[in-house]
Image (spheres, rainbow, N blue to C red):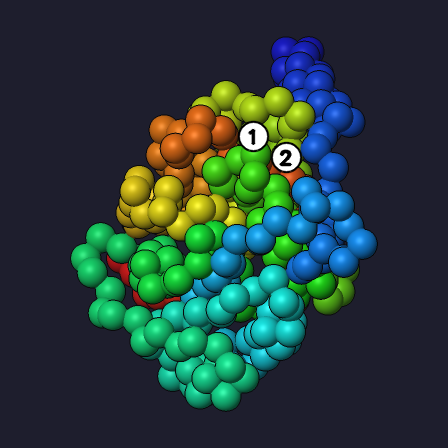
Amino acid sequence: MRALTALQAAAALAVAVRLARGRHRLPALNPVPAHAPAHAPASARTTPPRVSVVIPARDEEARLGPCLSALLADPAVAEVVVVDDESRDGTAELAARLGAKVLIGAPLPEGWVGKQWALKQGVEAAGGDVVVTLDADARPVPGLIGALAATLEGYDLVSVGPRYLCEGTAEQALHASFLATLIYRFGPIGPPTPPAPHRAVANGQCMAFRRTAMLNVDGFARVRAGGAAADADHVAPGTRLAGPRLPGGHDGRTTWPGNCGRASGPGHDGREARAA
């Protein structure tokens, strides 16, 4: 019994030490206007990068509308690309009607799971210098896209954690336990100094990166098979997603929480549930 108590005490101490590091984190992203006001100094009136938003979607007709409406109303967004992953509902029709560019996904190759394959196709089809990927049930607040693009001036890949909109106590407890487990495993999200490569993480619900850099390292092919260590819908090791440093020499930045609400309920998983 004493040995067990000692082990429990040691584990509790380890958890406390790891969680205490969260007192010092990068601040949450602040919304950035799409265009600098006319009275702003010349340095603030530089031409912003062209931003494409890529959304993988499978049977998301019931959840996709609010996300698209917010993005298409944002002047910082040049285009929204919805990759329709063999939806059996009206996902593609809804996206086209609202004004998004719809890409019908190609058949799933062997060795891939649905979401990663959809994202790879979407990034290749995007025309922007910067690509932001979002889940279909995300609720981006005004200024989020501008904030992500602005942060990329100092990083190659930016990943933010959303604020979850949970329905009921059980769902709140589930998300809280999941997030606490991630912090215990990887440490607090958004440390002021880059973590060790094996502890770098990226949240696949909302990421931003330079399109050319991601294509050069074929980032999504590095997590093509999913699994606990490379789940692009939840958390993927940043080094496997982005490769051994993208051009520019910067590690990815992860902030938590970010300025992106996420609706409750199941999000898009592509064909992950059916993949072997």
Q: Which residue is mark 1?
A: 186
Q: Is residue 183 left or right of residue 37?
A: left
Q: Residue 269 placed where, x, y %?
A: 44, 63
Looking at the image, how many numbered discs can be counted on the residues?
2
Identify which residue, 6 or 187, lies in the foreground. 187
- The residue depicted at 44 percent of the width and 58 percent of the height is 128
Q: At which x and y percent is residue 169?
A: 76, 60
Whether residue 248 is visible to the viewer of this picture, yes or no, is yes
Q: Residue at x 43, y 76 (%)?
A: 101
Tell me if 229 is positioned left or right of 185 in this view.
left
Foreground: 1 or 34?
A: 34
Q: Is residue 103 above or below residue 109?
A: below
Q: Give the class, few, some or many, for how many residues have Cα within 10 Å of label 2's Cα (few <14, many ≥20).
A: many
Q: Are the two marked residues, 2 and 1, in contact with CB atoms closer than 8 angstroms? A: yes
Q: What is the secondary structure assignment of the residue under circle 1?
A: helix
> Which residue is the site of mark 2?
189
